[in-house]
Every structure is written in structure tokens, then in C-alpha cells.
Image: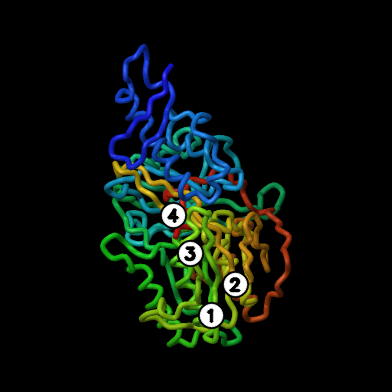
Amino acid sequence: MKTRNILLTLTLFITTLPGLTSCGVDRWQEYAAETEVDQWIAEVMRENYLWYKDMPKDKELNFFIAPDAFLKAVVSKEDNNTSYIDTLYKEPLPTYGFDYSLYRVADNDTAYNALVTYVLPQSPAAAAGLKRGDWIMQVNDKVITSKNESKLFETGLALSLQLGAYTVQADPETQEQVGIVVKSGTATLGAAAVVEDDPVHHHQVITTANGTKAGYIVYSHFTAGTATNPEQYNDRLRTISREFAEAGVTHLILDMRYNRGGSLACTQLLCALVAPKSLLGSPLGSLTYNDKQASKNSALMFDSQLIGSGSNLNITQGFILSSGETAGVSGVLLNLLLPLERWALVGSSVSCSGVATDRFDNPQGTWSLNPVVCEVFNSLKESGRGGSFTTAQTVNETTDLSKFLPFGDKNEALLGTVIGLIDGTIKPTKAVAQTPSMKVKEVIHTPSRKTKENTTL
């Protein structure tokens, strides 16, 4: 077969693909639609990907496979699933606005209860009165099973819920203390709707037993704003920083246990807000790109101009709450704050990708490609790439489900631990042994917010 150079429609590059002629007949138009997206991925990656030199040559690639499979075929072993591609939707998808985990009912091999883990404000779930820590025992009078779970929770229609509450009781036969879920009421969940996923989920000022003022923020993803208001969420952080400053906050508790990543620019703002005042204007870190994009190499600063209408909090001691879902830029933030020696991790260890991605939309506006484009270093010139951060206090929030409570409740497992660390009633350790004797086995976790996030510029 002959090889023909082709110019792909709506792209800005010329590439070579074998096999697009047959018996002298030009067939590139027949295959253009099937190869166009993969061709675009390869072109963007060869120019911008941090490890572009590790990519296979074009003749070794199959341009006729799905875009996500094609991306997996071209990324470097260094990538660690950080680069990703996603479809673009012109309109946000409707949602009930809550996440949940399924737990097997103790005396039934096929039935499950759903533990509500996260509720979006102003969502159908919030309007129905659902709270983190609630249990759903039945949906539309049907017991939840592994076979019907997705159908029950993904219809988008209004649902009738049988709610439950977790309690610890003595087993009638053995008198052993066991955790069970008992019926507590009902709720009507309205139809799924488009809901704003505000990353600043909850905030408050907490006064501990020793009089310390601590600011508490649940920060669910690093997003600066919306298309119509690019600084909307960052401005909320600035407003909260003023509230904390006026309240005399000296300690900060940043709850990122459900934070999967987002924008590095938001990280810079957070660092400026919490940094020692004496460090404003000094180096925070740096970005290093591949040799084709070396002109983009730049320094990151504790930039006082980013604070804008907010207030620098000059934090004395900071805590980051984490879980197995904490990922992406969260690890980069930890690495950037590491040289300050005044931040502690509570919850689970957090991996550090040490890199940032950037977003490229294909010309048709149907795909968003997010390849790794640079390595992120802190002021000590460490990226932490491939490593992880260990905890000052290891806490599994599902070890004692009686402490699985709404955000901001001082008895909630992770927040209660940090309050104890601040007021001195809990001493920090490298790890705390877990004793899940009263915990029912978690078998399925099903998040409703399914967007993948890493560390974007």
C-alpha cells in the first residue's frame, strides 16, 4: 500500500498515516473522521507533553481506537495516569447532588445500605434534607442491591427514600457491641437538576478548649470560578480570609478529603492567603516545561497581589484533612507548603504527582485533552514526584461510623482529631492503630460527582 500525506480538516498540522489508499483510490476522507481526534492528541502531546520523547513513533500507533485508549497508548511510564482526556458537554449534567458508599446489611447477603458522604448545597439532595452521615435503606420501597443500585440512583426522577441512622447496640445473643442501621424516617428526593458545585463547601470559625481560634474550610476542588465569573470561587476564599482575620484566626484546618485536584493558580492564592506575612514576595516554587516549551519556565511566588480584597492570615499552624480520594493538586499544595514547617496532615497519606497538566480543546469542541506539561518544584527545588506525604495522625473516618457526621461537627472523626491536636488533648503520632470492630464492611463506593481532576495550570 502507498503512504499518503493528508491534511486533516479543521486541524493545523499535516501528518502521515499508512494505509489510506487502496488500489490507487484515495480513501483519506473515508477515514478522516475516525482518526481525526487521535491525530490531534498526538500532535498536541508531541509539542506540549513533558515526556514527549517517550512517546511511540506514529508508525507504531493505531489511530483508529477510542481517544481514551489512544492516550493510554502514548503516555510515558512516568505519567502515572495523570494525563487524561474527557468529553466536553455544552450544558452541565443534572445530578441529585450527593455521594454515597454502600455497606452490606449484616444479616442479608444481597442487601445494602447507602451512607451519604457528601451533599452539594442547593441541590435536590440538600432540599430533601439529606446530610452527610445519613443512611438510605430503601429507594422507592425497594431494598438496595448490587444489581439494582445504579438503576435506583441514576433514573434522574424523583425518589422516595427510607432513611436510617447508625447506632451501636448490644447483640442479643453475644452481648457484643455492634453497629447497626435503624429506620429513622423518610424523605422525598426531587428530580435531578443542574447544580453548581461550589468548591468552598463549608466554612466556620472554631474556638477550641484552650481558646485557640481555628478557621475551618471544606475545599472540594481547586476551581477559580465559572465561565461568566472567572474569579467567583477565589473571591469567596478572599471573603472568608477576611472573616477569619477579623475573628483572630491563628490556625487553619483545610478539609480536602474529597478534593481530587484542579487549578494550580488556586493553589498559589491559597499559599498567599495562609503564608507567614514575612514571606510575601518571596519564592514559593517554580515550573519546568519540556525543551520545546522552555520559554514557559517560570517562578512561583508568595504573591501578595493575588490576595486582592482578601487578608493574609499569617497562619501559625495549619492542618490538611485527607482521605483516599485526596489527589492531584492537593499533593502539590502539600509540597509547596512543606518548607514552611508548620503544616500537618491528618487522615490518610497523600501521593504527590509533582506535575501540572494543561487543557487543550480539540477544534470541534468535543474533547478536552489534559496532558502533563510541567514539573512543579517547591522553594527547596523539590517536586516530590512519585512520593507521598505521611500523616501526623492517621485517621480512618469509617472506623467508627458513629463519628461519621456532617462537616463542621466537632465530634466528626477527622475534625475532632484536629481540635484535640490543637488543644493538647491528643498527642500527634506517626500513625494510630485502627480497630474496626464496630464497622460494617464497605463494599462499594459510588461518587455522583464523576469528574476527574488533577493539577491544571
Total labels: the figure holds 4
The one nearer the camera, 127 or 343, is 343
**Quarter of the N terminus within the rendering:** top left
Labelled pair 2, 1 in contact (Cβ < 8 Å): yes
The one nearer the camera, 226 or 198, is 226
For image coordinates 32% across by 58% down, the residue present is 196
Residue 171 left/right relative to 25: right
Q: Which marked residue is nearer to the observer: mark 3 or mark 2?
A: 2
**Label 3 – label 4 distance at C-alpha:** 34 Å
Q: Earlier in the sequence, mark 3 or mark 2?
A: 2
Q: Position of residue 435 (x, y in %)?
A: 71, 56
For image coordinates 61% across by 48% down, the residue present is 440
Amino acid, disc 2: Ser
The residue beneath circle 2 is 379
**Label 2 – label 1 distance at C-alpha:** 9 Å
Which color scheme does this rendered protein use? Answer: rainbow
Q: Which mark is residue 6?
A: none
The residue beneath circle 1 is 282
Amino acid, disc 3: Pro
